[in-house]
């Protein structure tokens, strides 16, 4: 399996190369050259299998010979041993035909752990074999950063730098990034919003002198391996409610479009997914795009679901590539317009294809709080604000009631205690293993929204 860039101007890479690189040199994102498929019989055979067994079967066609079967199984088992639930990603029932997929049982209590734990193990194996060292730089709206730090802390072959928007992440999120004591962990509080952090990261990847000098690697959801790891739970959850013998739909709280793109991949692989529903907060660029094809940035409006406070939805580029029949030049043109003018418009053909697979809904701040309250009152389920957005949208968009709906619960409520308590009166407790989070010492460096200053700091810390 080879990986090609969505902008068509970078050489094809192996899985290992694409994983260690992150962003393509032409500014594009790596995607598999073709979508491998699983037969209905193979999918039916997942019933009753462990999460780890399904993970192996779903991801194997994508990794080529990067790892032997034995190595890959060992990586998968190590990755999920840290999860606080035996099913890894269990589902609970909300009502007759609506299910909640709990993706928050990993070490930092958000779905990012599902992919990040796996990437940590894969990096360690691949770099160890090469005798290489890399510098991982990530941008986070809160959850990616803590998940990356948890996955990479203490590893010899990496330094990990995480840029987060100063003052715009929750106290739990910040403390998860600033309290680890390992010397290879560097938390950078950027004077800006998440899109500024993400733009800094992209600019570092496009500064080839810096990129090569520090051996830059990316673990944001622009990294294909992240998306891949998330494909697995679409299969496990769909099978547990009756696929492939019946169709299933998913509603996904969306920011950077990584998680829901994984659902699209599952569908391409043969999972009978009826609808994929994009759920946004008030930062609704994806909802607007689906309604009219107009993809215009409006500036980020901070919300009580901060992990979705995004207007530059990086992984959408991967879908755009397919919507434009995999023509890199067309994608490059749209992405240049987005960067230069803050806008592009999808062609009618592309918009039609988008609407064939996806629906969308937007959830206001007030509706988010109300959804938390109702879920607690009606089914005694305490939702984080992001998950509540999914539940609200799934419950309010027009849909085929005969098809089971699975809504992704992307974080544990204890990561966002203030918003949850204000909405439903319950103070969600942190699980025992992190009960002392607020007693630990914090360590972070404040930086301006300034590329050369941040690059200089990173060079100094890694000594190149
Ligand atoms: C990252 C995140 C999202 C958005 O996921 P994307 O893959 O960026 O669309 C939603 N909810 C939570 C809790 C997150 O951490």
Image (spheres, rainbow, N blue to C red):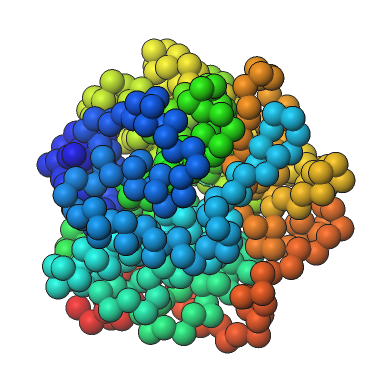
Which residue is found at the position 59% from the left and 49% from the top? 90
Nearest the eye: 25 or 279: 279
Residue 336 appears in the rendering: yes
Q: Position of residue 338 (x, y in %)?
A: 39, 36
Q: Quadrant of residue 71?
A: bottom left
Residue 287 appears in the rendering: no
Q: Position of residue 139 (x, y in %)?
A: 43, 59
> Is residue 83 left or right of 330 when viewed as pictured?
right
Which residue is found at the position 26% from the left and 40% from the top? 61
Q: Position of residue 129 (x, y in %)?
A: 16, 68
> Is residue 310 left or right of 52 when viewed as pictured?
right
Q: Does 132 sit above or below residue 381? A: below
Q: How many marks?
A: 0
Q: Does 314 sit above or below residue 355? A: below
Quadrant for the C terminus, please: bottom left
Q: Quadrant of residue 20?
A: bottom left
Which residue is found at the position 41% from the left and 21% from the top? 346
Q: Does 147 sit above or below residue 260? A: below
Which residue is found at the position 29% from the left and 73% from the top? 158
Q: Position of residue 123 (x, y in %)?
A: 28, 63
Quadrant for the N terminus, please: top left
Nearest the eye: 370 or 189: 370
């Amino acid at each position: 399996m080879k990986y090609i860039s969505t902008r068509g101007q970078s050489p094809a890479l192996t899985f290992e190369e694409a994983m260690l690189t992150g962003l393509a040199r032409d500014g594009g994102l790596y995607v598999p050259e073709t979508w491998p498929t699983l037969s209905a019989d193979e999918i039916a055979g997942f019933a009753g299998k462990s999460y780890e067994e399904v993970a192996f079967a779903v991801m194997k066609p994508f990794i080529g010979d990067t790892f032997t079967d034995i190595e890959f199984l060992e990586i998968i088992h190590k990755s999920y041993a840290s999860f606080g639930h035996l099913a890894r990603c269990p589902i609970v029932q909300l009502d007759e035909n609506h299910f909640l997929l709990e993706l928050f049982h990993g070490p930092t209590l958000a779905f990012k752990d599902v992919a990040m734990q796996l990437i940590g193990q894969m990096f360690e194996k691949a770099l160890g074999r090469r005798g290489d060292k890399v510098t991982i730089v990530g941008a986070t709206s809160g959850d990616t950063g803590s998940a990356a730090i948890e996955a990479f802390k203490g590893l010899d072959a990496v330094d990990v730098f995480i840029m987060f928007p100063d003052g715009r992440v929750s106290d739990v999120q910040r403390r998860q990034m600033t309290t680890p004591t390992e010397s290879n962990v560097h938390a950078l509080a950027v004077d800006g919003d998440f899109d500024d952090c993400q733009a800094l990261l992209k600019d570092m990847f496009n500064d080839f002198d810096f990129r090569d000098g520090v051996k830059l690697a990316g673990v944001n959801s622009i990294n294909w391996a992240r998306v891949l790891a998330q494909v697995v739970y679409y299969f496990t959850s769909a099978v547990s409610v009756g696929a492939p013998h019946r169709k299933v739909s998913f509603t996904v709280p969306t920011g950077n479009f990584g998680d829901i793109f994984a659902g699209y991949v599952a569908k391409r692989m043969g999972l009978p997914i009826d609808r994929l529903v994009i759920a946004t907060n008030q930062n609704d660029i994806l909802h607007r795009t689906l309604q009219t094809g107009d993809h215009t940035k409006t500036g980020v409006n901070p919300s009580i679901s901060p992990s979705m406070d995004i207007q530059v939805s990086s992984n959408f580029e991967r879908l755009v590539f397919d919507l434009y029949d995999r023509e890199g030049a067309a994608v490059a043109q749209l992405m240049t317009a987005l960067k230069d003018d803050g806008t592009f418009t999808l062609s009618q053909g592309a918009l039609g294809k988008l609407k064939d697979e996806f629906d969308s809904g937007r959830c206001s701040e007030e509706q988010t709080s109300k959804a938390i309250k109702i879920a607690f009152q009606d089914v005694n389920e305490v939702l984080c604000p992001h998950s509540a957005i999914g539940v609200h949208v799934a419950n309010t968009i027009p849909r085929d009631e005969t098809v089971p709906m699975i809504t992704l619960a992307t974080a544990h409520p204890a990561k966002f205690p203030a918003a949850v308590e204000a909405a439903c009166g319950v103070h969600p407790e942190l699980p025992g293993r992190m009960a002392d989070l607020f007693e630990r010492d914090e360590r972070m460096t404040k930086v301006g929204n300034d590329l050369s200053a941040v690059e200089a700091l990173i060079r100094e810390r890694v000594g190149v």
